[in-house]
Image (tube, rainbow, N blue to C red):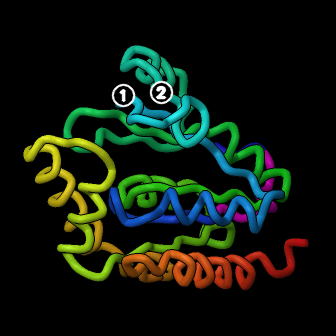
Amino acid sequence: MRVKELLGKLILIVGPSGCGKGTVIKTLKGKFPGFVYPVSYTTRDPREGEVDGEVYNFVSEGEFKEMIDGGELLEYAIVHEDEYYGTSKKEIMEGLEGGAVVLREIDIQGFHSIRKIVPPENLVSIFIMVSDEEDLKRRILGRGEMSDEEIGQRMESAKKEIAQADTCDYRVENEWEKVHECVSNVGNIVFKEIKGLY
């Protein structure tokens, strides 16, 4: 998998759909503009306001399967039973080989896949917690129009992910309407973990 020694650090922001991973990453981009921020690939349709190439690269299922067959993905999963999500190998591994800090949001499945590949000394995982089930449901509903079936799938997936939060290095709560506190706490962890890299 690796041709060169990994000199950088991969920081994974982990958590279920709706926990606020994207908001945390977006805010951290302003604080740490020199980091590498890989863009995920997905086969799901863009939601209103989403721009291709910003948070996700939107591709067809055929294109995604070609990436799998070509060994281009560091990890991938079928999420909510029908959509593919994955992480490009090239951008992350080249960043780590070059000594960069790579910051990436991911679900728990992706985290478990990546930690089999990236050595623990180059990997930091931060799980974003929510206050309770009602808080999580409110966040999921705020992501756009969904069927009751899709909401139910996302809630079940989220419960399974939250049950595995302790497998991550850190857990940070993202309280409703207190995202700045969450970002500050995550930022402090990042500062501590990258000390010595620069």
Read off the residue under disc 2.
58
Labels 1 and 2 touching (C-beta < 8 A): yes
As drawn, the label of residue 17 is none
What's the magenta region? 4-10
Q: What element carries label 1?
A: loop
Q: Position of residue 133 (x, y in %)?
A: 19, 74
Read off the residue under disc 1.
45
Residue 89 falls inside the magenta stretch: no
Q: Where is residue 28 in the image (x, y as percent from the top left)?
A: 67, 65
The image quarter in which residue 53 lies: top right
* Near-viewer residue (40 or 119): 40
Q: Where is residue 127 in the image (x, y as percent from the top left)?
A: 44, 73
Amino acid on which the number 2 mark rests in the picture = Phe
Q: Residue at x 25, y 73 (%)?
A: 135
In the image: residue 37, left or right of residue 150 = right
Amino acid on which the number 1 mark rests in the picture = Asp
Where's the N terminus, which quadrant?
A: top right
In the image: residue 135, left or right of residue 20 = left
Q: Principal SS element in the magenta part? A: loop
Crowding at label 2, few (<14), some or many (≥20) Cα neighbours within 10 Å?
Answer: many
Q: Earlier in the sequence, mark 1 or mark 2?
A: 1
Q: Residue at x 19, y 39 (%)?
A: 81
Q: What element carries label 2?
A: strand
Q: Distance between the residues labelled 1 and 2?
A: 7 Å
In the image: residue 3, left or right of residue 171 = right
Crowding at label 1, few (<14), some or many (≥20) Cα neighbours within 10 Å?
Answer: few
Q: Position of residue 80 (x, y in %)?
A: 22, 44
Q: In this view, does 54 lie above or below 168?
A: above
Q: Residue at x 86, y 79 (%)?
A: 196
